[in-house]
Image (cartoon, grey):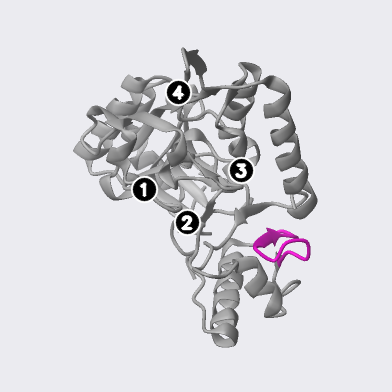
Amino acid sequence: MNSKGLMFVINDRHTYEQLAAITSPENVLMDEELYRHTYTQLGGRADFYVTPETYEQVQAIVKLALNEAIPFTMLGNGSNLIIKDGGIRGIILNLGRLAAIHKDGMHIVAQSGARIIDVSQFALSHTLTGLEFACGIPGSVGGALFMNAGAYHGEIKDVLKSAVVVDREGNLLVLDAADLDLAYRSSNIPANGYIVLEATFVMQAGEYPAIKTVMDDLTHRRESKQPLEYPSCGSVFKRPPGYFAGKLIQDSHLQGRQIGGAQVSLKHAGFIINRNGASATEYIDLIHSVQATVKQTFDVTLEREVKIIGEDPLT
C-alpha cells in the first residue's frame, strides 16, 4: 500500500473501474512501485499505472483525467528521469504496448513506446541511413521527441518529419516537425501537454556495411566510456556553452563523490550511478552537490538534462 493506506485504495475503486473499462484490468495497476520502471531504479509508488493498447484508449484516458480532475503524468521507459521517493499521484500513462515500427517508402514510422535503439536497428536492417546516432540512446521514441534526444553529432530534429500526438483535451493531431520547436535537448511537447503516439522519420538509402560500421563504432565508444553496468539516468547535465559537463565535474575532483548509494561515476564524470540501493533523495542531493561545487570552482552553472518529477517523501 502507499502512504494513503487501504481507505484510499477503496475510495478510488471507481477510478480503477473506469480505467479498466477503457483498456482492460490487466493494463491497470494500482499502487505500483515506479522504481521498477526507471533506469535509475528510483521512485515511489503510482496511484494508477496504465498501459493502453490503442490510440483511442489513450484519448479516452486523457479525457477521463480531464473530466474527473485526476492528476495525469506521462512516463516513457524512464531512461532520462528521476522519480522522487514520494511517488506520483493520479494516473501514470505508459505507452510501452504501443511499440510497432514499419517502413513506408523512405520513411520509418514508429510508435511512441518503441525504443529508439530498436528504430535504429530497424533502419539498419532495411539499409536506411540517418539514425545511426541513436543506436545507443536507451529512451523510447516518445521520450526522444520530448527532449530532442541526440548523441555523436546527431539529434532527432535532423530526421523527424512529423508526429501524431494527443493534446490536453484528448484530440488527435498530426504535426510537422517544425511545429514541435525542437532545439538542444528540448521541444514544446511538455509545455503544450502533448502525448506523442507516433513519429515519422525521413531516411536516406544507404549500404548495410557502411551503416553497421558506424553503429558498431558508436556502440563500442559508448560501452567503453559509460558506466552501463550500474543503473543511471545517462548524462545528468546539458553541455554548457564552451565547456563539457563531464570535464568540469572531473576537474572539480568530484569523481567518486558519494551520497548514500548514489555516486559520481569513476568511469564517466557526467554520469551519476545508483551504486548501492540509492534513494531518489540521495541521487538528487548528489546532483545538487555537483552543481554547487562546479559553480564554486569554475563559476559555470550546470543545467540538468535529466527530468525530476514526483513528490517528496512524507517525513
Earlier sequence position, callout 1 versus callout 3: 3
Q: Which residues are magenta?
A: 264-278
Q: Is residue 231 above or below residue 133?
A: below
Badge 2 element: strand
Q: Amino acid at mark 2?
A: Lys
Kindly identify which residue carries mark 1.
187
Q: Is residue 12 above or below residue 103?
A: below
Distance CA(mark 1)–CA(mark 3): 27 Å
Of residues 195 and 91, the one nearer the viewer is 195
Decide whether residue 275 is among the magenta residues: yes
Q: Amino acid at mark 1?
A: Ser
Kindly identify which residue carries mark 3.
36
Query: x, y (%) of residue 261?
Result: 71, 65
Q: Residues within 10 Å of mark 3 (few under 14, many from 20)?
A: some
Residue 307, numbered label: 2
Of residues 47 and 165, the one nearer the viewer is 165
Foreground mark, 1 or 3, reads 1
Of residues 62 and 198, the one nearer the viewer is 198
Earlier sequence position, callout 2 versus callout 4: 4
Distance CA(mark 3)–CA(mark 4): 19 Å
Badge 1 element: loop
Badge 3 element: helix
Badge 4 element: helix
Q: Name which residue lies at 26% across and 45% down.
A: 192
Query: x, y (%) of residue 70?
Result: 28, 43
State whether the magenta stretch is mostly helix, strand or loop.
loop
